Image: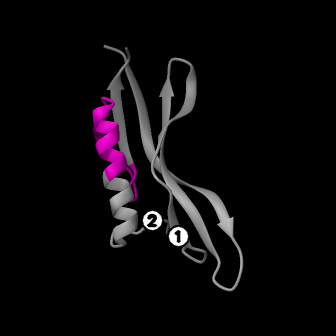
Amino acid sequence: MNWETGEIIYAIVEEKWGIFPKETAQFQILALGQEGEYVAAKSAKFDLEKFNTTGPNKKNKKHKAAFDAFTAKLTEQGWQQCGQGDLWFNWNLQRPLS
């Protein structure tokens, strides 16, 4: 069986400047399929504080809720976790090619 593989990452999609700067981020699955590398899915957007250098925080309810909803969506799309990266959200995933 041939597999499509991917890893959950986070990406900054918008920056907001001002007295209290912050960034808007989202989880994405960076996948490798038959046509090469692409973004297979994106989560709902969530805010990060501008000076947050570690990315999404598992203890932040909004970050965790976005991640949980995203991984549930990925499961529905046939993705299966097959490993764990360095950060709590860096799941390695795979799904059979259709």
Amino acid beneath label 2: Pro
Is the residue marked by circle 1 packed among few (<14), some (14-19), or many (20+) residues within 10 Å?
many
- Residue 70 is a magenta residue: yes
Can see residue 38? yes
Identity of the residue drawn at 40% across and 59% down: 87
Is the residue marked by circle 2 packed among few (<14), some (14-19), or many (20+) residues within 10 Å?
many
- Choose mark 2 or mark 1, whichever is in front: 1
Tag 1, which secondary structure? strand
Residue pushed farthest bottom? 19
Relative height, residue 81 to residue 61 (above, below): above
Cα gap from disc 2 to disc 1, whole angstroms: 7 Å
Tag 2, which secondary structure? loop
Q: Badges 2 and 1: C-beta atoms under 8 Å apart?
A: yes
Residue 28 image point, x, y percent: 48, 46
Label drawn at residue 56 = 2
Relative height, residue 96 to residue 40 (above, below): above
Residue position for label 1: 48
